Amino acid sequence: MESNLKKKLNKVLSSAVVLSAVLAPSAALADTPFKDLNQAASWAQGGILEAQSRGLLKGDEKGNFRPTALVTRQEVASILVNILKLQEPDVQASSYTDVPANAWGLKAIEAVKNAGIMRGDGNGKFRPNAPVTREELASVLVSAVKADTTGKGGNLTVADAAKISSWAKPAVEVAMEKGLLRGDGTNFNPKQNAPRQEVAIMAVNLANALQQQKPETTNPAGDTLEGTVDSVTDSTITLDGKAYNLASDVKSLLNAENNDALKGASIKTEVKDGAVAKVTYLELKAAGKAAESGEKEFSGNVVLNGGTVNGNVKVKGDYVSLKNLSVKGDLDITSDVSNGFYSSGLTVDGKTFVNGGSSNTVVFESSTLGKVEINKKGVRVEVASNTKTGDITVSKDAILVAASGVTLSKVTVESGVDSIEVKASITKLEILSKNTKVTLSSGASINTLTLPSGVKAEDVVRNYSDVKNKISNVNNSSSSSGGGGGGGSSSGGSSTIDDGGSGLKSPVYTSQPTGDLKKVKDVTLKGNDFTLTNGTITGKIIFGNGVDTVTLENVTIQGDLVVPRHKKVNLTGTSNVTGKTILE
């Protein structure tokens, strides 16, 4: 019997525990501590014994392991507390409405919540007695090992990838890459509830993954330092119980004012001359609260104000505000976020992933973003005043809002989107599927609407008859109304005047042009705001009455760009200025 059990153990651990070399089983494993071990699948028996030997899981008082019994969410919380050595808070009541004060898992549930590893459903409930699903396990495991899921979720090779919830796909891909969870050889079975025999193997995988991770350094003389933030003052940061000095360069981010927002965060830093000198990764787990009745929206948010992160930033907590923060990598508003994300003065050099949020979030105000991907179904994304973004890609049903005076250069709506509501001025809106339905608000305007071949605007835009004058071009042809979208007058027209023998025309536009600019000298604009596309201006843009904002898409200014006081020029696509930009 000893020989058979050792063979089973070695087989299971060699196939399931791929992150590290497996510890040699002790002779005690052959003693078969569980009376019902033979009820477990053959592939699971060795993992069960290993989990028991290492104190990761236990049986019941009758000596049974119950290998096929389903595992509840509070049982998972208890297992994580054990493996991660989390400190259980001394609380008498739960922060969740469905966890009673006498629940045996109360403190474990609060511990994993404080650590940012498990959260509720966004409605104040934890569902402690609900069986945990395999996709939920994937999310928990990836959070436990602090793995980065940015940009993940699109390369799943399992046959049932489409059945995996969108919020879980990044975690499932990472969990499978790291060997924390596996499928059945064909499918991942994301909605299937996890029995104890699977969780036993999961526990061994997680323990080995943590054991093999690079230890968090406690030597400030080293090159890197990472860990969990306990607290921050104006001169020190305490990680995992040990305090470190702060260099002046990071004090705009790491300071007492930001202590509440940084508490519990996962952080990676670089150390120079014995002090933390640069933050290279930040994962925020702290959460604020909903605004009190009568108070301003987001007034209950926890606020991170100022500084630079020289890498990626993840937001995992609800009711979080980022202000005056520079992110040199990507920003991920993760699927853990259900409420209240707000930003002001935010700069993101990489991509911004909106993977969380709800119908009354997410808001970017006075911010500068690179490309934006909206991947959460039902989310409302507001590009508020004085915000600039790169191209926006929408992969789930969403509401896209832009403030008056803000023009989005390009928005691409992917084929998986059934419905999108647009309350924005957009230079180019590209719809990839004939099945997508678009609703335009009365304040929206589209310069160019690009549709699949053979599809008409009225087939896609629900309220087309009401808003057709807001769409200037469909597939680069004038819309059937002949209207001047983008705010241009629907009457008047355009004319050109000769430039005295220079060989170049100087157009005077009184309504939105429908074709490419090509090459001209001066351009005179009258009546309202304009979008000019594809060409070269060798002279000036002359702002006539009624023109406040001009958007240039793929336009080169050969010389200086002169912008009068209180006027605005947006450069999008490949637009550039060869000379100076002069603000009068």
Image (spheres, rainbow, N blue to C red):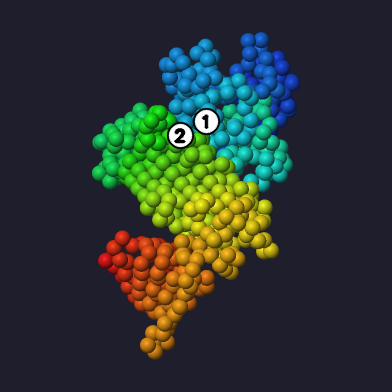
Q: Quadrant of residue 63?
A: top right
Label 1 with label 2: CB-CB less than 8 Å: yes
The one nearer the camera, 435 or 307, is 435
Evaluate whether residue 575 shows in this view.
yes
Residue 268 is situated, as x and y percent measured from the top left of the image, at 40, 41
**What number of labels is visible?**
2
**Label 2 environment density (alpha carbons within 10 Å; few <14, some 14–19, many ≥20):** many
Point 56% across, 35% down: residue: 139
Q: Nearer the viewer, residue 455 or 247?
A: 455
Q: Secondary structure at mark 1?
A: loop
Residue indicated by mark 1: 122
Q: How far across and how far down the image is residue 273, in percent? A: 27, 44
| Residue 148 visible in rendering | no
Question: Which of the 4 image quarters holds residue 196?
Answer: top right
The residue at the point 42 percent across, 16 percent down is 90
Secondary structure at numbered mark 2? loop
Query: Quick check: 580 above or below 272?
Result: below
Q: Nearer the viewer, residue 365 or 38?
A: 365
Picture coordinates of residue 502 (x, y %)?
39, 87
Residue with the mark numbered 2: 318
- Which labelled disc corresponds to residue 313? none
Q: Earlier in the sequence, mark 1 or mark 2?
A: 1
Q: Is residue 194 left or right of residue 87?
A: right
Q: Residue furthest top?
A: 62
The three-letter code of the residue at mark 1 reads Gly
